[in-house]
Each structure stands twice: as C-alpha cells, then as structure tokens.
Image (tube, rainbow, N blue to C red):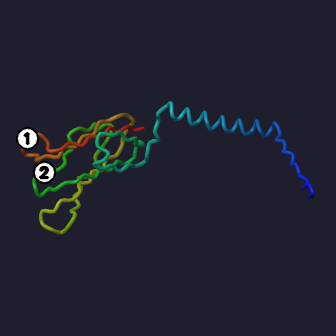
Amino acid sequence: MQAQASTVVAPRSVRPATVLIILAAVAVVAVGVIALTQTGKSIAAASATLGPAEAGSAVALEVGGELTITLPANPSTGYSWVVTALNPALLTQIGEPEFSADSNLIGAGGTMTFRFQGTAAGQDSLQLDYLRPWEDNEALDTYSVTVNIR
C-alpha cells in the first residue's frame, strides 16, 4: 500500500486595512439604523390613500400633499359620511365627496371618496361621521385619523 500525499493549503491572509474598512461600513449602517429606530420619524408622503382598515391611525403628509379617504356607503338609505372635525388652517377639503356605486342596481351601496389637501404644517384630527344629516341621532359609524402635516 502506498501512502497518499496530502496537500495543505495555507489560508490567505486578509490585510488589516480591508478589515478596518469592512468594520467601518458595518458601524455606519448600524448607527443609521439605530438613529432611525430611536427617532421614530416617518417620511411624509406627497399623497396618501386611506380606507376603513386605517381608522384610528396616523398618517404623515407633506404640505401641499393630497389625502384621499374612501369609505363604504349607501346614500339610498339616507346615510352619508359627513366631515365633523377638521382644522381648515391645516387641512382643506378638495371639492365635494364622490359616490361610486358597486353596481347599476337601484339602491346599491358603494364607496364615498373624500379628498383633502395639507395647507400648513401641524397636526389635525380629522373625523367623519356616517349619519343622516337631518336627524339628531348619534352617528351610525365614526371614522377618525390623525394627520401630521410636514
């Protein structure tokens, strides 16, 4: 039997400068991630679209940005969404709400769309109530969102 010769490969050495550059890059990324996590800041959007799932949430919006809210509605019942809380110095409603029916059937439900524009920096609590405007009863439903305009 013959003995097999084994080959030993020596590991390549890494230059100390390369190690320092890699460590510095990792440190910069880590500091950036920690800074963003600690500040809790969100990036303001030029526009945002919200629906029923975002009720009670907060949204960041740029000054001049447009906020669109789309909610289920059925005006044939007499109920409609009405803006009941809005600071007009910070947020302005754009036009009238638009209704889009889910079908061509008489009395069909659909969605009501509201559009708002951020006019100045600040925080506003926007509220819409689903009610019959001529009745003094409580709203059937309420939708609210906090808008942070930057």
Q: Earlier in the sequence, mark 1 or mark 2?
A: 2
Vertical placement of residue 75 versus 120, above or below: below
Per the rendering, the mark at residue 71 is none
Mark 2, Cα crowd under 10 Å, few <14 / some 14-19 / many 20+, is some
Identify the residue position indicated by label 1 in the image.
Answer: 137
Identified at 71% across, 35% down, the residue is 24
Identified at 20% across, 40% down, the residue is 84
Vertical placement of residue 140 versus 109, above or below: above
Q: In front: 5, or 125?
A: 5
Q: In front: 20, or 124?
A: 20
Mark 1, Cα crowd under 10 Å, few <14 / some 14-19 / many 20+, is few
Labels 1 and 2 touching (C-beta < 8 A): no
Q: Secondary structure at mark 2?
A: loop
Residue 118: give x, y in percent of width and height: 36, 43
Q: In front: 82, or 30?
A: 30
What amino acid does circle 1 point to? Asn
Residue 51: give x, y in percent of width and height: 30, 50
Residue found farthest to the bottom:
104
Q: Quadrant of the N terminus?
A: bottom right
Per the rendering, the mark at residue 79 is 2
Q: Secondary structure at mark 1?
A: loop
What is the C-alpha distance between the residues marked 1 and 2? 12 Å
Identified at 66% across, 38% down, the residue is 26
Identified at 14% across, 44% down, the residue is 140
